[in-house]
Image: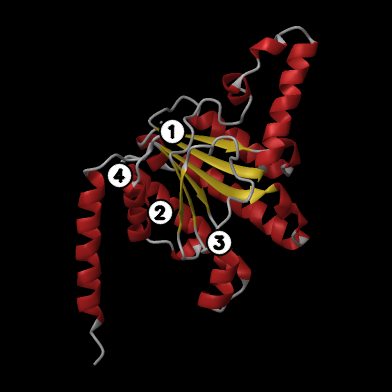
Amino acid sequence: MRIPGIFTNKAYSKYEDKLESEVLQGKIPEHIAIIMDGNRRYATEVLKADEKEGHMKGKDKLEEVLEWCYKVKVKTLSVYAFSTENFSREEGEVSFLFDLMEETIMHFADDEKTHKNKVRLRIIGEKEMFPDGFRNAVAYAEERTKDYSDFSLNIAVAYGGRQEIVKAVKDIAKDVLEGRMDVKDIDESAISRHMYTYELPDPDLMLRTSGELRISNFLLWQMAYSELYFADVYWPGFRYIDFLRAIRSYQQRKRRYGK
């Protein structure tokens, strides 16, 4: 016998409320990093549509997840939107993705919710690789939100974790060669100061959607002690209940840092 949807929806809502209550009583991660994976597969397998539909659904999901962060008081959200390797995709898809990201960033910069919640936006990555229109949008959005500190949204674009470390090493080497720094002063803190995220705490929790069990060159330095969570659902299909389960999993783990 098929159970009517109204009953399953009520049961789902009741479970979600219970889970939310449990999560809010525990320690909330200050910084969550997300690898937003599965847009294209969601489009072809779930929507039976063009891959662009999956990317647009993925954009909407990011806005939704940011709302969840406001709700449970996650102060910093970092997401992997476009890697340096993604430039190898077809030119039409790359152009579409940058147009979509430009639209997203401009909307974020002008959205009253951004200013009400005092969210600072940072775009991290190799900005010299950005198309002109996207670069202008980034400058506009970062300028509009630069004085906020209640929440932080960091979007990694043209980003690679290894490339970030190489850049930090080069910057430090230049400082040493030009006399601004001594070799003996090179330590973990010095390297961290040369990362894109130097003003932010390292991620407490990294989650990846789509069921893939990789971190794919994302925040390699910063995630040295992060808890990892892999959700077997495509990014556009990621639900609030999945978000809460990831946080609950984080809360249930014992973080010893080698002690």
Residue that label 4 marks: 72
**Residue at point 64%, 46% (across, down):** 217
**Nearest to N terminus: mark 1 or mark 4:** 4
Label 4: element kind: helix
* Cα gap from disc 1 to disc 4, whole angstroms: 25 Å
For residue 164, say whether it is visible: yes
How many numbered marks have been drawn onto this rendered protein structure? 4
Label 2 sits on a secondary structure element that is helix
The tag on residue 257 is 1
Amino acid type at image mark 4: Val
Report if the CB atoms under discs 2 and 4 are less than 8 Å apart.
no
Q: Which mark is residue 64?
A: 2
Q: Alpha-carbon distance for marks 1 and 2?
A: 33 Å
Between the residue at mark 2 and the residue at mark 4, the CA separation in whole angstroms equals: 13 Å
Quadrant in the picture for the C terminus? top left
Q: Earlier in the sequence, mark 3 or mark 4?
A: 4
Q: Nearer the viewer, residue 158 or 230?
A: 230
Please state which of the two labelled residues, at mark 1 or mark 3, is closer to the viewer. 1
Residue denoted by label 3: 212
Q: Which comes sooner in the sequence, label 1 or label 3?
A: 3
In 3D space, how far apart are the residues under numbered discs 1 and 3 (Cα atoms)?
A: 26 Å
Indicate the position of residue 197 as horizontal and vertical percent values: 56, 31
Expressed as whole percent of the image width and height from the top left, the position of residue 130 reads 72, 42
Q: Contact (CB < 8 A) between labels 3 and 4?
A: no
- Residue plotted at (46% across, 65% down): 232
